[in-house]
Image (tube, rainbow, N blue to C red):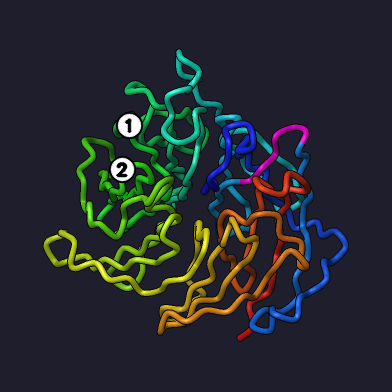
Amino acid sequence: MFTKLSKAAVTAAVVAAAAFAMAAPAPASAASAPLGYTRTAVHFDLAKGQTPENLALAPDGTAYVTFAKARQIAAVSRDGAVRILATLPAPADGGVHTPALGFPLTTGIVRAHDGTLYFLYATGTDDLTGVWRLPPGGRPRRIAALPAAGLPNGLALDARSRTLYVTDSALGTIWRVPAGGGAATAWSTDPALAPAGFLGANGLKLHNGAVWATNLDKGTIVRIPIRADGRPGIARITATGLAGIDDFAFTGRGDQIIAALNTVNEVALVQHDGTHTTVLTAADGLQGPTSIALHAHTAYVPSAAYLTAKDPNLLLTDLRN
């Protein structure tokens, strides 16, 4: 998610993500051998605060995105049209008590098979911080409160058990929430999730019977098995040395991961044994990548430009077989 900056420098995370209408291709770096054709799909308007934070993809290619600073959820069609689906209420105090950042923001987002969107909102206040749901054609509603002292960040949905998992970057916790709504429970507070000065547990995915999370401060990926009774197993660090790691995605090749390294302006390919190589850099058009989403054999990589303060964008890159 966010890098460690002054509050002025961490200006917004407004996602506008989007479209398949391609701009001129960005030059491919020599490091990107595991990837194919890479191009800049959309250049966002920094003056309007369009800094992309997180996205979820529908089967038809529609991208559902969080506009973090604007407190909005948007749908971006394949032809690049952006439609605002919801704007969340601002906290009464302006969100100045939002942990680590000092402003309210929407963060992780997932989409259920029926089109329902689940997303996270952090405000530093008890009345708004938590998990929100937006049904197709409906209005947003908070379905679970989370601690105001926390910063809900990454989100994943277990469709089989109708359970949502949430990383809390400030409290170093993974929460579990019924998709139908209800009380959140702390599923894991393993030390591997804790921050080390700024933000800890960040990106989140469910894969192969386990919860996988990144730790931004520690540059690690953590795997926690889900036991038969739903409780967490023993946490194991599967990769280290991933400076500034934000969100990530599995490539479809076992436990292989493609990860956004926000602070160093890179995307890394992480192998099953934890080794990693750089596959995208600033030469490919990255401007502080925040997350990864896959549609067929294409990876979507939004950049928020938190550190570079120029050209927030969306890159599309082909995953080679």
Q: Secondary structure at mark 1?
A: loop
Residue at left offset 31%, top offset 68%: 223
Q: Which mark is residue 171?
A: 2
Q: Is residue 73 above or below residue 195?
A: above
Q: Residue at x 82, y 66 (%)?
A: 26
Q: Which mark is on residue 149?
A: 1
Q: Eyeballing the image, is 30 above or below 259? A: below
Residue shown at 25% from the left, 48% from the top: 176
Q: Residue 303: x and y, percent?
A: 66, 53
Upstream in sequence: badge 1 or badge 2:
1
Principal secondary structure, stretch drawn in magenta: loop
Residue 50 is inside the magenta segment = yes
Asked if residue 233 lies left or right of residue 201, the reply is left
- Classify residue 111 as left or right of residue 52: left
Of 65 and 239, nearer the camera is 239
Q: Amino acid at mark 1?
A: Ala
Q: Residue lying farthest left? A: 229
Secondary element type, mark 2: loop
Image position, residue 62 (x, y; %): 63, 52
Q: Is residue 66 left or right of residue 113?
A: right
What is the magenta range?
47-52
- The residue lying at 62 percent from left, 56 percent from top is 289
Residue 284 location, x and y as percent? 76, 67
**Label 2 Cα crowd, 10 Å radius (few <14 / some 14-19 / many 20+):** many
Q: Amino acid at mark 2?
A: Leu
